[in-house]
Image: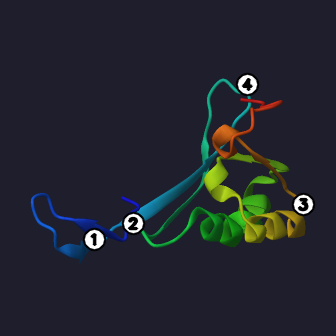
Amino acid sequence: MVLNHAKSIGNTEIRPLFGYFLGLSETCAPDNPFQLITDYRLEPNITSDVEMLANRAGDIREHTGVEKLYVDGGFHGEAVYRAAEENNIDIHLTNMTGKKQRNLAC
């Protein structure tokens, strides 16, 4: 669940919800016979996509040697681009930003 607050059904009272956000990275190559999860991170549900990836980019690069990351539009943010540049990773956003996908390997 990625909500900070929600209304109870049939009740107008807003109460905090507690939960977690799981971020996964996986291989994405059509020539692989199968794809593997290469990184995961569990954070409180108030953590943004941008914050999570910006904090994990270095570890992902170190452990996998990744050179390109394909992510959805929720990862669009200055901190992500900065972390990617610092770790020599090319970030490619998918069409959630309103742009068509181009040259995706998967």
Residue topped by disc 3: 88
Disc 1 marks a residue whose amino acid type is: Leu
Disc 3 marks a residue whose amino acid type is: Asn
Q: Quadrant of residue 74?
A: bottom right
Residue topped by disc 1: 17
Q: Closer to us: mark 1 or mark 3?
A: 1
Q: Identify the image quadrant of the C terminus.
A: top right
Q: Closer to us: mark 4 or mark 2?
A: 2
Mark 4 closeness class: few <14, some 14–19, many ≥20 residues within 10 Å: few
Of the two numbered discs 4 and 1 on the same chain, state the one appearing first in sequence: 1
Q: Closer to us: mark 2 or mark 1?
A: 1
Disc 2 marks a residue whose amino acid type is: Tyr
In this view, the residue farthest toward the left is: 10
In the rendered structure, are the residues bearing label 4 and label 2 in contact, judged by CB atoms less than 8 Å apart?
no
Q: How far is disc 4 from disc 3 in space, using C-alphas?
A: 23 Å
Secondary structure of the residue carrying tag 2 is strand
Find residue 30 and name its label. 4
Left or right of residue 55: residue 40: left
Residue topped by disc 2: 20
Secondary structure of the residue carrying tag 1 is loop
